[in-house]
Image: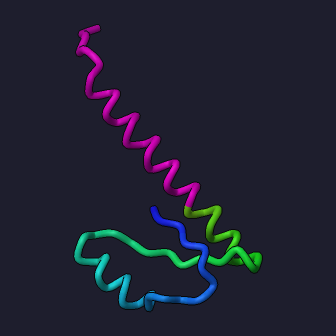
Amino acid sequence: MACKSDTSKEVDPHTAATMLRDHKVGLVEVSMYDDPGKDKMRRCFDWMIRAIYRDRCEHSLSYLPYTRS
């Protein structure tokens, strides 16, 4: 995840998204200046935290020893 606080767009978002697609990475453009942008930012962070949590849970379960009941 990358955060950028510039108000002017130095890089075209469409061009950046096209480049990122080659690496199977997404791009979400948000704004801190209006409510919809703030909501989108919150949802992005929520998704990222949940994805990290899911990944860690899946990996920790693979290390548990197998026991038969």
39 relative to 52, above or below: below
* Residue 5 in which image quadrant: bottom right
Quadrant in which the N terminus is drawn = bottom left
Q: Nearer the viewer, residue 30 or 11?
A: 11
Assign the C terminus to one quadrant of the image: top left
Q: Residue at x 44, y 50 (%)?
A: 51
Q: Position of residue 18 (x, y in %)?
A: 31, 85
Q: Residue at x 63, y 84 (%)?
A: 7
Q: Is residue 26 above or below residue 17?
A: above
Q: Quadrant of residue 57?
A: top left
Instruction: Please indicate whether residue 28 sits to the left or right of residue 32 in the image.
Output: left
36 inside magenta stretch = no
**Placement of 8 over or under 50, stated as above or below:** below
Secondary structure character of the magenta stretch overall: helix
Q: How is the image coloured?
A: rainbow
Q: Nearer the viewer, residue 9 or 40?
A: 9
Quarter of the image for residue 29 reads bottom right
* 63 over 35 or under it: above or below: above
Q: Is residue 63 a member of the stretch shown in magenta? A: yes
Q: Nearer the viewer, residue 58 or 15?
A: 15
Classify residue 25 as left or right of residue 49: left
Which residues are drawn in magenta? 45-69
Tell me the residue at 23%/15% (across/down).
66
